[in-house]
Image (cartoon, rainbow, N blue to C red):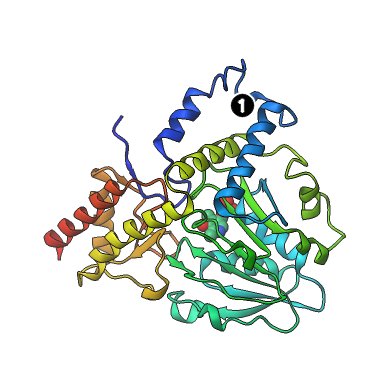
């Protein structure tokens, strides 16, 4: 097989060796006479793998002991509701930093539950910039401050994070988790879908400071209540078994390749290859404030929409997939997640230069 060069934003590229391990062990896992996806989630076969997955996750991301770690279903999107249901108390506000589509969706769900304060709203600058982390101070009566560490659609990423004191800081890290070290202690909650940088779609990781549960709404139905999952390390109901298995294998791969520091180095190198092409030309244009450019999702424009269409169609012929921008914003986007080989990024960079030469 000739592998496509996969720039999809999610689900997205996985390490070939993980795919091969899933294939090789699909029918029989570890000489046990059955597949991982046929085994009970209450039995050793799954639970041993699950415990290893959680331990590896904790080790690599340096998640402290006083944080819960588990996986839920429902995608990152379910968390847009669960967070305000659990933590947005009456007579308070929740501060949201509206940095783009994903934080915007989270905030509009929170508005259905309680009072949202748009601490920052990037609509006016078309979500091309972010507030300075050191200047962010939550409102006095704030239940929590919410941000999205990397806007997958807008291509904008926090480079460091605010200090919110006693007000819990909550972050959606769906699209840049494990691409760099994270100061977990600054956050009360970090969550994200695994399908961008961590594995096959299906699971959402939840990292939550145990003390956050003291501030929780006690009147929720069982699944929607984080304390249910905290007590059961995420095994209250059937977890997304296949997805978690894939995450375990991806974490093994990350560990072998230098951990989060290794991934960070790769991300810096790979993104610089594309940003250098953009900055060295007047043909390509980045709409994002250079201070906050994403290393995972690089958004760029060409002089016209016709040229953008042509770019995507010629790139597709060359085996490069997923370069069309999100339908809500147009333009072009190349997602450079951990598993994307550097050679594919170099290939894209060369293609961009050739395209400019022929069409510029
Ligand atoms: C993809 C994405 C989501 C949505 O994830 P689902 O698992 O599809 O619900 C939320 N936030 C960010 C930052 C994303 O990239």
Q: Which residue is mark 1?
A: 36
Where residue 240 sits: x, y (%)? 64, 38
Q: Is residue 118 left or right of residue 320?
A: right
Visible in this render: residue 335?
A: no
* Extreme-left residue of the structure: 358
- Does label 1 point to a residue whose CB lies under 8 Å from ligand 1? no
Front residue (pair 329, 72): 72
Where residue 274 sits: x, y (%)? 28, 60
Q: Quadrant of the N terminus?
A: top left
How packed mark 1 is, by other alpha carbons closer than 10 Å (few <14, some 14-19, many 20 or more), is many
Residue 82 position (above or below residue 120): above
Total labels: the figure holds: 1
Q: Is residue 344 left or right of residue 92?
A: left
- The residue positioned 71% from the left and 31% from the top of the image is 41
* Extreme-right residue of the structure: 219
- The residue positioned 61% from the left and 26% from the top of the image is 36
Q: Quadrant of the C terminus?
A: bottom left
Q: Secondary structure at mark 1?
A: helix
- The residue positioned 24% from the left and 44% from the top of the image is 317
* Extreme-top residue of the structure: 33
Q: Which image quadrant for residue 145?
A: bottom right
Front residue (pair 67, 226): 67
Q: Is residue 85 left or right of residue 290?
A: right
Residue 206 position (above or below residue 47): below
Q: Which image quadrant for residue 276?
A: bottom left
Visible in this render: residue 61?
A: yes
- The residue positioned 73% from the left and 44% from the top of the image is 234
Where residue 163 sits: x, y (%)? 61, 76
Where residue 330 sits: x, y (%)? 38, 63
Q: Which image quadrant for residue 236?
A: top right
Q: Quadrant of ligand 1?
A: bottom right
């Amino acid at each position: 097989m000739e592998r496509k060069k996969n720039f999809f934003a999610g689900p997205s590229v996985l390490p070939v060796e993980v795919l091969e391990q899933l294939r090789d062990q699909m029918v029989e896992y570890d000489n046990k006479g059955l597949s991982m996806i046929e085994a009970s989630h209450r039995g050793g076969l799954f639970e041993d793998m699950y415990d290893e997955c959680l331990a590896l996750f904790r080790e690599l991301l340096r998640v402290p002991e006083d944080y819960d770690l588990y996986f839920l279903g429902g995608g990152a999107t379910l968390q847009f509701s669960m967070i305000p249901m659990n933590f947005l108390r009456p007579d308070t506000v929740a501060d949201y930093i509206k940095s783009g589509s994903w934080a915007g969706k989270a905030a509009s769900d929170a508005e259905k539950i309680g009072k949202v304060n748009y601490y920052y709203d990037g609509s006016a600058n078309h979500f091309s910039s972010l507030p300075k982390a050191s200047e962010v101070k939550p409102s006095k009566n704030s239940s929590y401050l919410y941000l999205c560490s990397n806007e997958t659609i807008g291509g904008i990423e926090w480079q460091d994070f605010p200090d919110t004191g006693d007000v819990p800081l909550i972050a959606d890290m769906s699209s840049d988790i494990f691409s760099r070290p994270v100061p977990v202690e600054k956050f009360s909650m970090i969550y994200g879908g695994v399908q961008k940088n961590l594995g096959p779609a299906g699971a959402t990781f939840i990292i939550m400071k145990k003390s956050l549960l003291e501030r929780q709404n006690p009147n929720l139905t069982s699944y929607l209540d984080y304390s249910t999952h905290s007590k059961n390390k995420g095994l209250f109901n059937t977890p997304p078994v296949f997805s978690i298995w894939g995450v375990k294998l991806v974490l093994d791969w990350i560990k072998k390749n230098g951990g989060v520091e290794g991934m960070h180095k790769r991300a810096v190198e790979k993104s610089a290859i594309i940003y250098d092409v953009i900055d060295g030309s007047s043909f390509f244009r980045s709409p994002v404030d250079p201070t906050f450019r994403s290393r995972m999702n690089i958004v760029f424009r060409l002089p016209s929409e016709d040229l953008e269409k042509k770019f995507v169609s010629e790139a597709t012929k060359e085996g490069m997939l997923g370069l069309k921008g999100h339908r809500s914003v147009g333009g072009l986007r190349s997602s450079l997640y951990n598993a994307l080989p550097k050679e594919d990024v170099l290939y894209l960079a060369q293609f961009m230069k050739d395209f400019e030469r022929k069409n510029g």
